[in-house]
Amino acid sequence: MSTFTSVLTAEPQIVRIRVDRGYRPAQSVAQANVPLRLVFQRRDAEHCTERVIFSSPHIERRLVANGTTVVDLPGQPPGVVRFTCGMGRYRGEIALVKRRATRVPRGWLLRSLAAGAAVIALLAGIGMLQVEAAAGVGTLMTGAAAVLLVESRFAKTRSSSQA
Ligand SMILES: [Cu+2]
C-alpha cells in the first residue's frame, strides 16, 4: 500500500553521505523515532575527515580512508543531529522529522484531485467560476498534490534503504 506502514518495521532508514573534504549532502532529512543508518563513503584520506563526531548521541567514529563506514544511530525524537569532522571544520546535519500522524490513502487524494478538477470545470462551464472559489479549490488540490509528493519521497527512501 502507499501508506507509511513500512516505517513501523524495525528496519533502519539509510542515509548515504559522501566524504570528500566535506560532507555531501551536508543536510539530510530522516524520520524521527526510527533507527538511522549512516553510510559514510569516504573518498579522501585527509587527516581532517578521519573522525566524525555526532551531537546526538554524543559519539565519535573513525571513518575508513577511501572506504565505507557504517554508523548506526538509535531512533531519536524530532530535532537536528549535527556532525563534524575531528576539528569541527566540516559540518553536516540531519533533520529528524515526525512522520505524518495520519495515514492518507493515495486513492482518496487522487479522487480529491479529480473532484477538484471536476468542480472547476463545472463552475467554469456554467459561468459561475469566482476567482476566490477557484483559488480555494486550487489550494486544496496543491495541498493534496504536495502530500502525494512527500509520500512518494518517503516511499522512495524506504525502497532505497532495502538495497
Ligand atoms: Cu577536520
Image: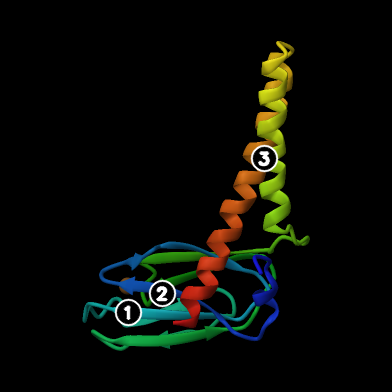
Q: Is 81 placed left or right of 44 in the picture?
A: right
Q: Secondary structure at mark 1?
A: strand
Look at the picture and state if 159 lies above or below 97.
below
Q: Nearer the viewer, residue 109 or 78?
A: 109
Q: Amino acid at mark 2?
A: Arg
Q: Nearer the viewer, residue 37 or 138?
A: 138
Q: Residues within 10 Å of mark 2 (few under 14, many from 20)?
A: some
* Residue ID for mark 3: 114
Q: Residues within 10 Å of mark 1 (few under 14, many from 20)?
A: many
Give how far apart the Cα atoms at labels 1 and 2 are.
7 Å
**Coordinates of residue 20 in the picture (x, y in percent):** 26, 71
Q: Nearer the viewer, residue 134 or 158?
A: 134
Q: Secondary structure at mark 2?
A: strand
* Residue ID for mark 1: 41
Q: Which-is-in-front pick, marks 2 and 3? A: 3
Q: Amino acid at mark 1?
A: Gln
Q: Give the colour scheme of this rendering.
A: rainbow
Q: Amino acid at mark 3?
A: Ala
Disc on the earlier residue, 1 or 3: 1
Look at the picture and state if 145 lies above or below 156.
above
Give how far apart the Cα atoms at labels 2 and 3 are.
37 Å
Disc on the earlier residue, 2 or 3: 2
Q: Nearer the viewer, residue 87 or 68?
A: 68
Give how far apart the Cα atoms at labels 1 and 3 are.
44 Å
**Coordinates of residue 112 in the picture (x, y in percent):** 72, 43
Q: Quadrant of ligand 1?
A: bottom left
